[in-house]
Image: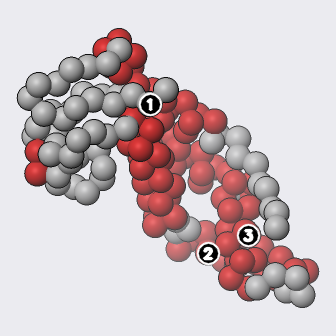
Amino acid sequence: MKLCRKLNKNVKLIELKYLKEVYQMIGRNDPCPCGSGKKYKKCCQSKKAVSVETVQKEELERVLQSFYEEYPERKDIPDYLKLANEWKSSLEKYLPEEMIEAICLDEFFFHYRSDIWLGYLDKQKKKIVRPSVLRVVDAWQQPRAFIGK
């Protein structure tokens, strides 16, 4: 079910109770949920509608993107490089080097040094206000690796 609301003064809410749970009401002077950094009134208020799913997806993408901007920290790089070199020696015949490094980075954070990932998620959970986004982030506590063609 696609829930949305018209973003003007004549707002008519659809299933208000559900919207309050899933979607935090936006004030004109609040930061825009699209992540632009602008005030809502200067950004998306004039648009016809914003779907809750779009806002949730963008918030989850920001959580992931900010993780890879912050990590690995300098102190973690030697351990990551050691693991990456082990993987490269085994997989260089089958995969490009960049792909091996990307897969290895995920493996490093999610399985070898899961304390980094879990600590990051704990910090992010304190900032998240939408229950639906929080449920997804909770599910990320136990990541699984899938590699396919």
Q: Amino acid at mark 1?
A: Lys
Residue at 15% across / 45% down in the picture? Answer: 46
Residue at 75% across / 77% down in the picture? Answer: 100
Residue at 48% across / 35% down in the picture? Answer: 133
Q: Position of residue 69 (x, y in %)?
A: 46, 66
Q: Secondary structure at mark 3?
A: helix
Image marks 2 and 3: residues in contact by CB distance under 8 Å: no
Residue at 51% across / 49% down in the picture? Answer: 120
Q: Secondary structure at mark 2?
A: helix
Q: Position of residue 16 (x, y in %)?
A: 31, 14
Distance between the Cα atoms at labels 1 and 2? 43 Å
**Labels 2 and 3: the sequence-earlier one:** 2
Q: Please identify the quarter of the rendering in which residue 88 is found.
A: bottom right
On screen, residue 140 versus residue 73, left or right, reads right
Q: Residues within 10 Å of mark 1 (few under 14, many from 20)?
A: few
- Note whether 138 is above or below 31 in the view shown: above
Q: Which mark is residue 104?
A: 3
Q: Position of residue 131 (x, y in %)?
A: 45, 26
Please tell me whether mark 3 or mark 1 is closer to you in this view. Answer: 1
Q: Amino acid at mark 2?
A: Ile
Q: Secondary structure at mark 1?
A: loop
Q: Is residue 136 visible?
A: yes
**Labels 3 and 1: the sequence-earlier one:** 1
**Labels 1 and 2: the sequence-earlier one:** 1
Q: Write down the residue under mark 2.
A: 77
Q: Which mark is residue 2?
A: 1
